Image: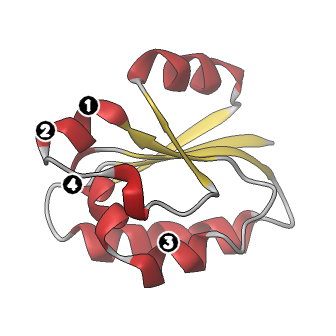
Amino acid sequence: MRLCLLINPTDHWQHAVKYAHQLAMATEDKHQLIGVFFYGTAANIITDSQEQSKWQSLAKTPLYICRTMMDDFKLSDESLEQAFTVIGMAPWIGLMEQADRIVEII
């Protein structure tokens, strides 16, 4: 099954990102994770290099951060690890159309 993860926390982005990482690791062997999108306050992962490093263990999974959220929170991509790509909503919607299931972590 082809899965997309949308991390869109209402608050406590660290908890949502941690839970999403555990879910991604658990499904990695059984399903194809075709993308993870850090949306809303989850875009703050840019400010946490340790959390970014954890996600790099998913070498085959594309990791995306929402450009609009970065702009809204005045975040810079200077500290962003190479595994992450900054994109807008349109490319993400295109990726979701390719997925069998979309899991939103709030």
Q: Earlier in the sequence, mark 1 or mark 4?
A: 4
**Which kind of residue does numbered mark 2 sit on?**
Asp
What SS does tag 3 mark? helix
The N terminus: image quadrant: top right
Spatial CA distance of label 3 from label 2 is 20 Å
Q: Earlier in the sequence, mark 4 or mark 3?
A: 4
Does residue 106 appear to the left or right of 98 in the view shown?
left
x%, y% of residue 56? Answer: 66, 70
Q: Earlier in the sequence, mark 1 or mark 3?
A: 3
Q: Residues within 10 Å of mark 4 (few under 14, many from 20)?
A: many
Residue extending furthest toward the bottom: 50
Rendered image quadrant of residue 34 = top right
Does residue 74 appear to the left or right of 68 in the view shown?
left
Does residue 16 sit above or below 37 in this rendering? below
Does residue 72 appear to the left or right of 70 in the view shown?
left
Asked if the residues shown at circle 2 and circle 1 are in contact, with their CB atoms under 8 angstroms apart, the answer is yes
Residue extending furthest toward the front: 78
Find disc 2 in the rendering and name its residue.
72
- Mark 1 vs mark 4, foreground winner is 1
Q: Residue at the spot x=27%, y=61% of the render? A: 44
Find disc 3 in the rendering and name its residue.
52
Q: Residue at the spot x=73%, y=53% of the render? A: 61
Does residue 9 sit above or below 94 in this rendering? below
